[in-house]
Amino acid sequence: MRAFHLSLLSFFACFVSTFAAPPLLPIIRDNLNLTAAEIGYAGIASVTGAIVARIAMGAACDTVGPRLASASLILITAPAVFFTPTVSSPVSFVLVRFLTGCSLATFVSTQYWMSSMFSSPVVGTANGVAAGWGNLGGGATQLVMPFAVTLIRRSTGAAKFTAWRIAFYVPGLFQMMTAFAVLIFGQDLPDGNFRRLENSGDEIPQILFHGVRNYRGWILALTYGYCFGVELTMDNVIAEYFYDRFNLELQTAGMIAASFGLANLISRPVGGRLSDEVAKRFGMRGRLWTLWLVQTLGGVLCVILGRVNSLGGSIVVMILFSFFCQAACGLTFGVVPFVSRRSLGLISGMTGGGGNVGAVITQLAFFRGSKYSKETGITYMGIMIICCTLPLCLINFPQWGGNPSSSSSSSATEEDYYMAEWSSQEKERGLHQASLKFAENSRRERGRRSACNTAPANDTPSSSSPAIFAV
Amino acid sequence: MASTTARPLLLLASAVVLASFLATAAHASGLFSTLPKTLVVTASPTPGQVVKGGEDKIKVTWGLNKSLPAGTDDKYKTIKVKLCYAPVSQKDRPWRKTVDHLNKDKTCQFKIVARPYAGNDSIEWTVEKDAPTGMYFVRVYAFDAVDGELGYGETTDAKKTTNLFQVEAISGRHATLDIVSICFSVFSVVSLFGFFFNEKRKGKAESK
């Protein structure tokens, strides 16, 4: 449980640091004389770094273990947070946001660590809660930073343009402390630490090949970009939106913006849980249908958010939107574990990276410069969510069916699907055993009716709920 | 039981809502384009002069335009003097946008002074520390007894291109902050290496 708390806390801290600037933008934009375009670029920069960093983090976890990998990243990106108080130009602002944003790669190490420490029946829940409560940081920071500025101004009488700078030591120190905690109190595995992960004998090029070849991974990367990517975008723009559109105080705008990210407390775990519950009755088709429905509804609410003119209405719609958006994140990782067994890590990394790509594209298209007002940008983002969620209908598993098809091909089996990733030589070497076991256990993804008809009834609950198994 | 407490609560709630509507209606302001330019305003900075935020002072003088008929300013009760952004500082910054509806206009975000109308008047004002770097002009609004705008005057022309001055903001940076940042950053990286060496040492000791 210590590993759970340590990785959760450090991931949370990275989110706090990455999104510490947005709630203070009304002050920062005047101090650095930023234009709307520069603010947009900074927002894009903050989520771009993690695209590559997440993939690299996967490799790092494999070589030095999640404890050292995550602590290293956190301590290396902490200087970016510490140097934020010294920026004096738009370029330096964009740079520190980029470097700070790389810390979001700790998503991968968190999931990796959870998967190493928790057994199959609970690993899904551990991953879902860790991811959700880590994302919470993006919401908490919108509350904490304006509050810190107010506190600093009241106690030291510092000018606005100095107070925001001092406030940045809060996320910086917090981030550093969590890294120390991870290093001092954490361990990679139940039995201790390891210097190099025992190689299962598999080869990276093969893993890459099978992962990249699977079209479902690409579709999920796209759709994750329109739930998680949208969440990142909202973390970047929502405080300024409320501040400017409704003429609120900095702290009030921060409080409202915070509620978007804070919904992660329940929404993402609920999404994962929902995926599991639906799968009991309807199997994989249920998971896919529910994901499509929840994410599309999120898109509809996003469109409405851009059109609502009243403050009260906006807050209500925003909170509803956040629930659906984040639940979709949880639901996505209810499908990801089943796409590939051999290349599970890669598919998860692609999906995670795809989330960031979605954030970059959305901010580039709708939230850069003054071309669109923020409310128009939000409406267009909603339309894009609806459109980019449609490809989920294309996902088909031969053994379980897909979105619009009503029944699976009766001759396809789970074994066929997962064994297709291994060549006969590799099977001779026995590398495919884990995948074979997984294939047997995944028969439950056929749903209640079909599962009853399959022989043999698998009574070992060894992988009872891999649903929110976000590795 | 619920309905007997609910009814007075409902009345109270609607009274509050109605009152707030009336309050905003009382401040119902018009459009800038319909506001007559009745005041003459001058400010001490020369065109293009750079004024330092938090340090330098500017002097603003205003009064009724003498060429207007007497009695134009009969209803003027209060005056608000404001520091306003010039168009060049509003470019690509929608949070400073000029909107005709006075309630929504964001051109003038700094209040220099608000005081009762006294005909010809002036003020010497130290530029606020919060004022961002940019080009500015000064505008004076005249209000009636219920805070409705009646007239205005400004130091620049209708196109807001002449007679602008520059404010140079404080940077907000301090040498102390720079030093603290460097110290924390160095500590962060050095401690990482420290931990790595420690791990290696422990690994060697265990393998012996």
Image: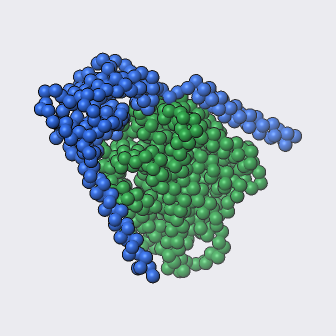
Chain colours: A green, B blue
- Could you say where residue A56 lies in the image, as x and y percent from the top left? 57, 41
Quarter of the figure that contains the N terminus of chain B: bottom left
- Could you say where residue A448 lies in the image, as x and y percent from the top left? 51, 77
Q: Is residue A53 visible?
A: no
**What residue is drawn where x is 65% and y is 29%?**
B183
Give the left or right position of residue A30, taking residue A110 as reference: left
Q: Quadrant of residue B137?
A: top left
Closest to the observer: B51 or A177?
B51
**What residue is drawn where x is 53% and y is 40%?**
A149
**What residue is drawn where x is 67% and y is 60%?**
A118
Closest to the observer: B71 or A289?
B71
**What residue is drawn where x is 13% and y is 30%?**
B68
Quarter of the figure that contains the C terminus of chain B: top right
Closest to the observer: A356 or A74?
A74
Q: Residue furthest bottom?
A: B1
Q: Residue furthest right?
A: B208
Instruction: Look at the picture and state if A27 lies above or below A8.
Output: above
Instruction: Look at the picture and state if B128 lies above or below A336.
Output: above
Q: Is residue B3 visible?
A: yes
- Could you say where residue A3 lies in the image, as x and y percent from the top left? 69, 53
Closest to the observer: A116 or A306?
A306
- Could you say where residue B152 lies in the image, as x and y percent from the top left? 22, 34
